[in-house]
Image: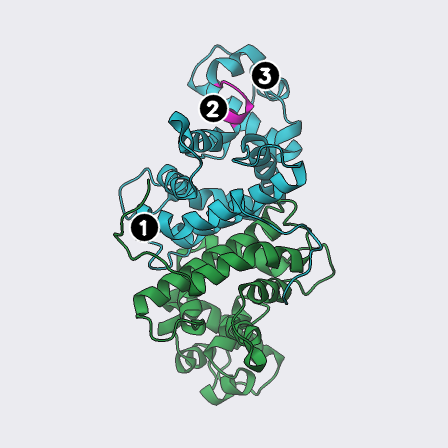
Chain colours: A green, B cyan
Amino acid sequence: MVRAGRRPGNVDTRAEIVAAARTAFAELGYQRASIRGIAKRAGVDPALVHHYFTDKSELFIETMDLPMDPQRVQSQVVADGRPFSGERLVERFLAQWEQGPPGVGSPSFLTMVQAVASSPQTADAMREFLSDRLGTHGTAGEDAVTQSRRRALVSSQLLGLGWVRYVMRVEPIATADRADVARWVGPTIDRYVNGQLPPEGAPGHL
Amino acid sequence: MVRAGRRPGNVDTRAEIVAAARTAFAELGYQRASIRGIAKRAGVDPALVHHYFTDKSELFIETMDLPMDPQRVQSQVVADGRPFSGERLVERFLAQWEQGPPGVGSPSFLTMVQAVASSPQTADAMREFLSDRLGTHGTAGEDAVTQSRRRALVSSQLLGLGWVRYVMRVEPIATADRADVARWVGPTIDRYVNGQLPPEGAPGHL
């Protein structure tokens, strides 16, 4: 695409910003990419990027065609002062991916896993994005290592759930009601978030 | 590729059988594909297919470049009369994917998820293969629906674990010792295999 210098704000400009962001995230990862650098690549003023996108996370969500900001899903779970609930997190996680008609699964989830699986750079960017956006629940005061462990375990179960429900379509998870899946998987999330997890190197039972 | 009728057993023939099997599984799925049909596609006698591959599952494992027969992993977990252990299943699952040097992750796992994510037909074949090869543990006498639910939940956690360890490389799961990961995730598997799971439509706490 030939760029003719700066352009006024219009649909093409927005698309060029997104294209520039996609390249920047792939080359630099999420953390090292910046609004300023993306603006430069797109040949526009950083203020124009901010005109379309509140911040870098919103731009990443757009480039990956994600249906949501993971941080918002987390907030919904504990909205109105409710205590954390693994069951509610699972239900919210699934609901965000299922915005099309029932039974269609989640084209967005499939697109996301294809992108992440096909490029180590995209996988890196996605990991950095999640690490930046996901807080911890119910683990105030714990050290950073333990918090990372809890977060990684929660991610493993939620992403695996999406994998069997949307990609491999394993029954009964593929077509069960979200509320049922949430009841089955919720206790797993509760343990990862609030339960005792042995430290690395602890004795096991193999 | 031009086929010159039946050929004697040699490396080329084996490769042709595998290529024919790959096409058959993609077109027909795992269940409907047959050794006889694959032999016909490859232009060889079914006996020659059996010369190279014990059964259809071995052929599927070869076409998908899987490091193992999932059934064998299941057997290892309860070998020598030991009771089922989620911790041991997680350790065995990871060990089978990690046959290269430490720290390299699992190229086979990445290849598998790329294949499954890129084609619905391959996803279907993989699902049918797992359904055919995976038995249940500790749930003798339960109805088929409950057994499928347990198996799907176990798959969701194990595949999600592979996803964060090998594809997204989320720390600390990416580089933790297998034994540590097994201790964190084992209780989840135990609950999916032996625990109480509410039936579909049961009241929840959303």
Q: Are marks 3 and 2 on the same chain?
A: yes
Judging from the image, mark 3 belongs to the subunit labelled B
Q: Position of residue A106 (x, y in %)?
A: 64, 58
Can residue A17 be seen here? yes
Q: Are marks 2 and 1 in contact (CB under 8 Å)?
A: no
Badge 2 amino acid: Ala
Vertical order, B169 against B71 (above or below): below
Can residue B159 be seen here? no
Q: Quadrant of residue B169?
A: bottom left
Give the residue pinned by disc 3. B43
Residue that protrudes farthest toward the bottom in the picture:
A47
Q: What whole-number distance in Å separates the C-alpha atoms at marks 3 and 1?
A: 49 Å
Give the residue pinned by disc 2. B15
Q: Position of residue B142 (x, y in %)?
A: 63, 36
In the picture, the disc for residue B180 is 1
Judging from the image, mark 1 belongs to the subunit labelled B
In the picture, the disc for residue B125 is none
Q: Are marks 3 and 1 on the same chain?
A: yes
Which mark lies nearer to you, 3 or 1?
A: 1
Q: Which residues are magenta?
A: B53-59
The one nearer the camera, A197 or B160, is A197
Q: What whole-number distance in Å separates the C-alpha atoms at marks 2 and 1?
A: 40 Å
Judging from the image, mark 2 belongs to the subunit labelled B
Q: Position of residue A43 (x, y in %)?
A: 46, 81
Instruction: Say what secondary structure mark 3 lies in.
Output: loop
Q: Position of residue B203 (x, y in %)?
A: 68, 60
Instruction: Say what secondary structure mark 1 lies in.
Output: helix
